[in-house]
Amino acid sequence: MSIIKIDRRDFRQPPAEAASAEAASQPTAAPRPSQEGAGLLFDAAVLREAGLLSPAYEGFKLAREYRYIKRPLIARALGRGATRVPNGYLVMVASAVSGEGKSFTAVNLALSLSLEKDLHVLLVDADVAKPQISRVLGLAEAPGLLDVLRDPQLNVERAILQTNIATLSVLPAGKPSAEATELLASRRMEQVAAALGEHDNQRIVLFDSPPLLQSNESHPLTQIAGQILVVVRAGSTPQPVLLDALETLKNHPAVALVLNQSVQSAAAPYYYYGYGSERSDRAENP
Ligand SMILES: Nc1ncnc2c1ncn2[C@@H]1O[C@H](COP(=O)(O)OP(=O)(O)O)[C@@H](O)[C@H]1O
Ligand SMILES: [Mg+2]
């Protein structure tokens, strides 16, 4: 299991320099409609206001910050530089309880991955009970995952929205359902997940998800996902709670911990521990 630390960010007050650099790197083009879906503006200001975007979102700075999550994740998803894990392109962003930073991590990791060459990121709002990403992006009413699961005639690609970032697309949560757990646990969900990879073999699918210990919907997602990132809020999640959450994943072959909002001094670099038998490595401060 790997452990990755993410710096705490005051995203509401980006440093002036970062803000202007970011403005320069913001996509200015109109949203580009995909072949099948409508265009969607992935709006940095809106995401930041909602507390879902790091000020490090300025091109390569963000890429650097998340690279210690990205590198092993990409390797296992697409088989680059390491053994591909079964269904490794399906990545669940999980946590024990809510409020630990799943949505924050999913959004920032998706943006960071979108800067990579030769891959495409699909951000799926699978936190169907609390679809924050869908809400913030104005997609609360948009057809999404649950609609696709409910209706076998619906092609999932038609519900996917291409954003104004060429390598990033979004699948909203869809119309809420009392049967969400059953839908997510259905054979149809397996087929949809497989179709997402078959349609584009350079695609990494990031699932923002419900908390492991506070919902039934998360369990089926753990069965589908080839990789699971467990976001842990530093200094907040009690150890027994985290251990309970990890217990639910004990048979999963690719679980990584992301220590979110860790407070780091300049002299205390992040540490990254490789998966399984890989050697521990040491990361730089971003
Ligand atoms: N690394 C971070 N730095 C600063 N604030 C963060 C960070 N991660 C999460 N937050 C904030 O913590 C709160 C909970 O995060 P969120 O991603 O919504 O949690 P979850 O999706 O797990 O319920 C949000 O207000 C978010 O802005
Ligand atoms: Mg969330």
Image (cartoon, rainbow, N blue to C red):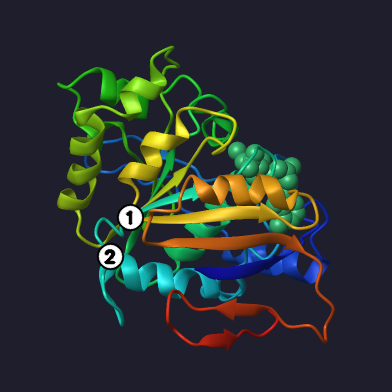
Precedes in sequence: disc 2 or disc 1: 2
Q: Is residue 181 left or right of residue 18?
A: left
SS class, disc 1? loop
Q: Residues within 10 Å of mark 1 (few under 14, many from 20)?
A: many
Mark seen at residue 123: none
- Image quadrant assignment for residue 63: bottom right
**Closer to us: 128 or 57:** 128
Q: Where is residue 64, by image quadrant?
A: bottom right
Callout 2 environment at 10 Å: few (<14), some (14 to 19), or many (20+)? some
Tell me if residue 57 comes above or below residue 50 in the rendering.
Answer: below
- Asked if the residue at tag 1 contacts the one at tag 2, i.e. Cβ–Cβ closer than 8 Å, the answer is yes
Where is residue 86? Give x, y as percent: 24, 59
State which image quarter holds ligand 2.
top right
Amino acid beneath label 1: Gly
| Foreground of the two, 54 or 78 | 78
Q: Which residue is mark 2?
A: 85
Which quadrant of the rendered structure holds the C terminus?
bottom right
